Image (cartoon, grey):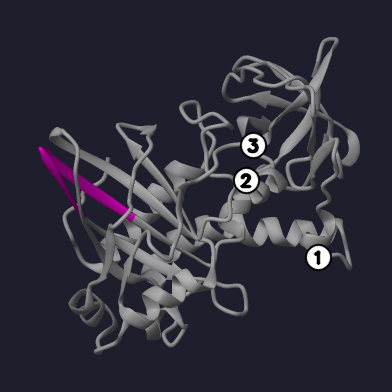
Amino acid sequence: VNNPIPSNLKSEAKKAAKILREFTEITSRNGPDKIIPPHVIAKAKGLAVLSVIKAGFLVTARGGSGIVLARLPNGTWSAPSAIGIAGLGGGFEIGIEVSDLVIILNHERAVEAFAKGGNLTLGGNLTVAIGPLGRNLEGDVALRSSAAVYTYCKSRGLFAGVSLEGTCLIERKETNRKFYGQDIRASAILLGDVPFPAQADDLYEILASFTEVYENEEQKNNPGKSIREQKRVCARFICSDYFGVFVTAFYYHLRVLYLRTYDPVEVTALYSFEGQQPGDLTFKAGDKITVTTKTNSQFDWWEGRIGGQTGIFPANYVAIS
């Protein structure tokens, strides 16, 4: 868990990159159903990344620090603005807990509310929901929730539910002034009035891997069609272009869609993967897998076979031999 004590913006950006990577990358500890789905970040209008400490004795108090960024009209991300978080809650809780928090701003009004006022109170006019994890179908998520804000919280390395109703994100003006060398409001930073700093390159790299790669592949695989046009929902199943799966009303049946067929390639499993849905390919670390269908990205699902078994698997569980 990262340090919730407020620090300079360079350190906050470095911390944010580390947290975001822990929340989004498939590892031996984070299975494919325990990450923030790429499309959630790809479609976000803004996001905040923070470390938070919560202390309770009859009444709980929450405080911490981090950064917020906004999506610019050209699709890139703004420079980071330093923020703090503060809130009070009820309930009989005793003790201290430190956790990491990613807040996804799904709508422009959520970003505008923060940019205009410098502060943003969650709840009220901005609905808050716990964000979807893993391979939740994109269409299904859109049907189930229209929340302006998604929240993701990790405590002791595990995802945990968290209620942020009434919690306030606060602009740290002095931290921004020291970093950018001028008096500048969060609104100007989030509107793109300053270029993104080189000190935050690691943060933009991880964001790009889940936004630009996603969007470019959608356009490349479906030229002339918007992502919205690609999605279709019918009474019997929901189709997800990006994850390449469909769900019937009665059972899961996975198949590979929109993938490109190549000459078979052999890869080596870096981690063990236990199939969690029908159609998954189960394997152990060190196994050799023959890839039969793949995309250009290892942030995707490929199809392969081991012996007489064929199925799909997370591509960044393997290394090309």
In the rendered image, the vertical position of residue 189 relative to residue 33, given as above or below: below
**Which residues make up the magenta segment?**
50-63
Out of 256 and 61, give the one closest to the viewer.
61
Task: Say above or below: 276 vs 10.
Answer: above
Q: Secondary structure at mark 2?
A: helix
The count of marks equals 3
Mark 3 vs 2, N-terminal side: 3
Among the 4 quarters of the image, the one containing residue 227: bottom right
Please identify the quadrant where the C terminus is shown.
top right
**CB under 8 Å between discs 3 and 2:** no
Query: Relative to 202, is 265 on the left or the right?
Result: right
Marks 3/2: CA–CA distance = 15 Å
Q: Residue at x 40, y 75 (%)?
A: 113
Query: What is the magenta segment's predominant secondary structure?
Result: strand
Task: Choose mark 3 or mark 2, whichever is in front.
Answer: 2
Mark 3 neighbour density, 10 Å: few (under 14) some (14–19) many (20 or more): some
Quarter of the picture containing the N terminus is: top left
Judging by the rendered image, the residue that carries numbered circle 2 is: 144
- Please state if 140 lies on the left or on the right of 13 as rendered: right
Residue named by callout 3 = 135
| Residue at which label 1 appears | 226
Q: Position of residue 40 (x, y in %)?
A: 58, 53
